[in-house]
Amino acid sequence: MDNAAFPVTADAVRGLIDHAILKPELTRADVDAQLDEAAAYRVFSVCVRPSDVAHAVGRLQGTGVGVGTVIGFPHGTTSTEAKVAESLQALADGAFELDMVQNIGAAKSGDWERVERDVRAVVDAAGSTVVKVILETAFLTDDEVVAASSAAQRAGAAFVKTSTGFAGGGATVEHIALMRRTVGPDSGVKASGGVRGLDTLLAMVHAGADRIGTSASARILDDVAHRAETGSAASLGDDTSSY
């Protein structure tokens, strides 16, 4: 994707969005409302809690919205064996992409062999399924972001991703640019956490992101429509309740 020339159209923007439905307190009714919103706005995919995958696949059948899920979420400290088992169950339930959290403690320890081995096990279990590796950049130095991105890429992950959205810090333009420089043009970069409005989404895209994780999909796409209708760059602003 030519990020510098990214077209601000509804189809282009919705094609970037993994709509996050991950808060632990969400009820089934809450989840259903979010799934229906994702279908109405025709986003690329939803990213749901592992226990919601099969239900989401059934509810979204025929909508064209994919169902992804998270692995080792949100701390990344489950064993590799547990991550593999969780991945296999998610695939059996119909998940089409997996967003796994790297072993953050191993990353902070500089044990990149362990980080890479953990990612590779999930990638191998996933087969042809896209695996994105959540680095949790709020906890990492720039050097650790580079090392973690490189380890994920060596292990065969399709994407590196900034954040869970639950660690007190989210995506930054600086981290997205650093991750893009590290992995080059052949791997994906996902900005997630704190993308609450169209202006932030565009800043992330221009820095090198080619996927966006957000729960503010409605606000973002409403803003695209608003700008198209008014011919103005005036923003509807952020959805401050999103993550």
Image (spheres, rainbow, N blue to C red):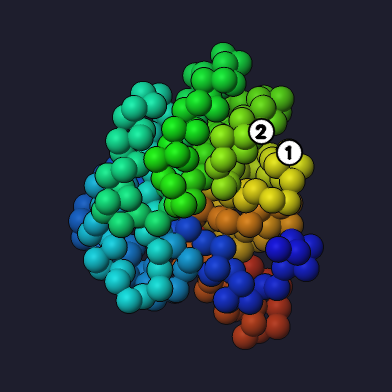
- Residue at 64% x, 68% y: name it: 235
Which quarter of the picture shows residue 78? Answer: top left
Count up the numbered dots.
Answer: 2
Task: Give the residue pinned by disc 1.
Answer: 182
Q: Nearer the viewer, residue 36 or 235?
A: 36
Residue 106 appearing in the image: yes
Residue contact at pointers 2 and 1, CB within 8 angstroms: yes
Mark 2, residues whose alpha carbon is within 10 Å: few (<14), some, or many (≥20)? some
Q: Is residue 5 left or right of residue 40?
A: right
Residue drawn at the location 61% of the way across and 72% of the way down: 12
Compared with 35, 214 (above or below) is above
Q: Residue furthest right?
A: 4
Could you tell me which residue is drawn at 50 percent across and 33 percent down?
120
Location of residue 13 with respect to 227 vertically, above or below = above
Residue type, numbered disc 2: Ser
Residue 65 percent coordinates (x, y): 40, 68
Q: Secondary structure at mark 1?
A: helix
Q: Is residue 240 visible?
A: no
Q: Residue 102 got which mark?
A: none
Label 2 residue SS: helix
Residue 150: give its label: 2
Q: Kindly identify the residue that appears in the image at 71 percent across and 25 percent down.
A: 143
Q: Position of residue 109 (x, y in %)?
A: 56, 14
Q: Quadrant of the N terminus?
A: bottom right
Residue 162 location (% of width, % of height):
58, 41
Amino acid type of disc 1? Thr
Point out residue 111 in the picture as x, y percentages from the top left corner.
Answer: 57, 16
Residue furthest out toward the left: 28
Name of the residue lying farthest toward the top: 109
Separation of marks 2 and 1 at Cα, in angstroms: 7 Å
Q: Compare marks 2 and 1 and give the one earlier in the sequence.
A: 2
Mark 1 Cα shell of 10 Å, populated few (<14), some (14-19), many (≥20): some
